[in-house]
Amino acid sequence: MADYDAVVIGAGIGGLSSASLLAHQGLKVLVVEQSGRIGGCCSTFERNGYLHDVGASIVEIIQPIEKIFTMLGTTFQNEVDLIPCDPIFSVMYRNGERITIEKSLEATGEVISSLDKRDGERWKDFCNYFSELSEVTIDALFFDPADNMMDMMALIRKNPKLLKFLPTFLQTYQDLFLKFFSSSKVLNTMAYQSLYMGMPPALTPGPFAMIPYTEHTGIWYPRGGMIKIPEALLRLGQKDGLEIRLNAPVEKVIIRNGRACGVRLEDGSEISSKIVVSDVNPQMLYRDLVGLEHLPWLIRRGVNSLELGKSLCMIYVGLDAKPDLEAHHSYIAVSMREVNDFWTDHVETGVMLPAEKNYGLICWTSHSDDSLAPEGHHVLNIIPESFYRLKDGNWDTFKDQFVEEYIDYVSDNLVPGLKDHITQVISSSPLDYERSLRLPEGALYSFNQDLAHMAVFRPSAKSNAIKGLYLCGSGTHPGGGVPTTTASGIIAFNKIIKHEKL
Ligand SMILES: Cc1cc2nc3c(=O)[nH]c(=O)nc-3n(C[C@H](O)[C@H](O)[C@H](O)COP(=O)(O)OP(=O)(O)OC[C@H]3O[C@@H](n4cnc5c(N)ncnc54)[C@H](O)[C@@H]3O)c2cc1C
């Protein structure tokens, strides 16, 4: 008799999504989490009265999150106090000019027209095109498995409108933007969002050029911090008997006769279960927790060929005054070319961009939710562009100087007086993320999110090598992001219900 029906490795959004659904189905479920906190990259920590988000700082395209709460018998809005963020973002040009983009499509059209009249006219065409594309692709691609070609054919049979948009999958984010807009000032307000997919515009698959449109359907921040989403999933799961153990790192998935039948923790204890669900990076799962010796050669080859994706350095800042910013998110204006070149000239060579040429995002979470800091105080997440592999030295020796120089640049050139009001600075380098969350190379979406790593090319939700082993999280379809990893948890749950007698 097994201790549990299912053991879930990792209390990230993917793991808690599948775990809460399995518990709601009446199954005996245990989540084991290596760290002392739930939520993984979608979490929040407190330091000296300031609440900082570990990674994710916003949710958009929330249909998968709404869906899981409905499946759990409630609603997202009932369980989490969602604050709508409007304006959506502001763009900071290096000459000191700024523009602010509101949720309203009309107001945005006017801003774009003020930058370039013709592009302002094309904004409406852009919105119409991506409104239709997002309606078709979000429903089709987020909720069904894409483990193999049969799944893909079933997906197209179920959503024949997808065929109309198939050519966009062969184009890039950049191709599609250049079809609609020509002014560099306009293009420079929309290049950065390709990094929401973890890829530069020249490599991001075309459908994701919908992001600068879908942001206008709403972006939200959970009052109290991003951790409120995993907390709600855990709370609902616990009502159905879900158990969780923190500070319980899994060392091995126990495999007998080709079937996963439990886990061994690093303290040597063993927990038996009828199935195992993994929310950790799939390459790490197969190489370290399962062992490549258990995999047929073809799958071993596939696992080894996966390329880890983008990582970054996060700077958590506490302030004793309101910063000179306008919106939850502010980007430094950047061209598609600069973002593409960063990949070839810097990520590949390991030579960091100097602070004055770096670009990135400033996330002002306390603009949306003033409960995150003591009265009159604020919190920012400052995110310069960066990567894991440095040519010289490593992040432990490089981080402090990198953070200091970037804050100096931002304070002297973009957010006047910022430095005078800083009360605390904490930072997490790609190496820190690797250590604290066991994200290999700090890769925030596990793998690249180009065509070669999407859908059937991402590891399957139902392991093809080990019976009784299921995968969810950003390393599986439909990829990284809080809503998408929620969707991965739903997909893994559906696979389990279909294939296992528990
Ligand atoms: C800096 C950053 C910014 C981001 N910004 C956004 C954003 O604004 N909006 C958005 O939607 N998404 C954003 N994302 C992406 C999003 O947060 C992630 O894709 C998503 O939260 C990943 O969830 P997950 O369940 O796949 O994995 P994770 O969050 O990585 O969770 C996996 C869990 O498994 C645990 N674990 C690992 N190994 C073991 C082991 N051996 N034993 C037990 N437990 C283990 C880890 O500790 C972790 O808690 C961001 C990510 C980062 C890092």
Image (tube, helix red, strand yellow):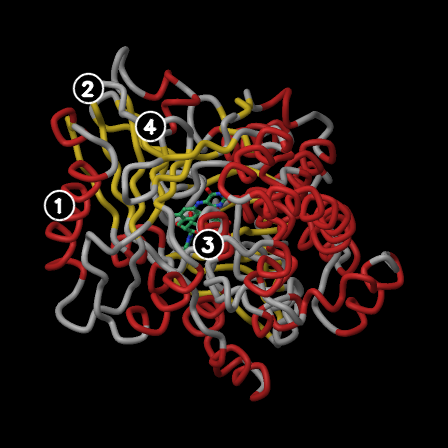
User: Reading the chain from its start, which is encountered first: label 1 or label 2?
Assistant: 2
Q: Disc 3 designates what residue?
A: 184
In x, y percent, where is residue 459? 59, 69
Q: Disc 2 designates what residue?
A: 320
Spatial distance from mark 4 to mark 2, Cα to Cα? 15 Å
Q: Residues within 10 Å of mark 2 (few under 14, many from 20)?
A: some
Q: Disc 4 designates what residue?
A: 325
Spatial distance from mark 3 to mark 1, Cα to Cα? 31 Å
Q: Residues within 10 Å of mark 4 (few under 14, many from 20)?
A: many
122 on left or right of 325: right
User: Reading the chain from its start, which is encountered first: label 3 or label 2?
Assistant: 3
Callout in the foreground (4, 2): 4
Spatial distance from mark 1 to mark 4, Cα to Cα? 20 Å
Q: Quadrant of residue 169?
A: bottom right
Q: Disc 1 designates what residue?
A: 404
Callout in the foreground (4, 3): 3
For the view shown, which residue lies furthest in the top direction?
Answer: 375
In x, y percent, where is residue 135? 76, 46
Q: Amino acid at mark 4?
A: Leu
Question: What residue appears at the point 50 percent right and 55 percent down from the top-left corner?
Answer: 194
Q: Is residue 28 above or below residue 420?
A: below
In x, y percent, where is residue 80? 56, 24
Label 3 sits on a secondary structure element that is: helix
User: Reading the chain from its start, which is encountered first: label 4 or label 2?
Assistant: 2
Spatial distance from mark 3 to mark 2, Cα to Cα? 37 Å
Label 1 sits on a secondary structure element that is: helix
Q: Are marks 1 and 2 in contact (CB under 8 Å)?
A: no
State whether residue 272 appears in this view. Answer: no
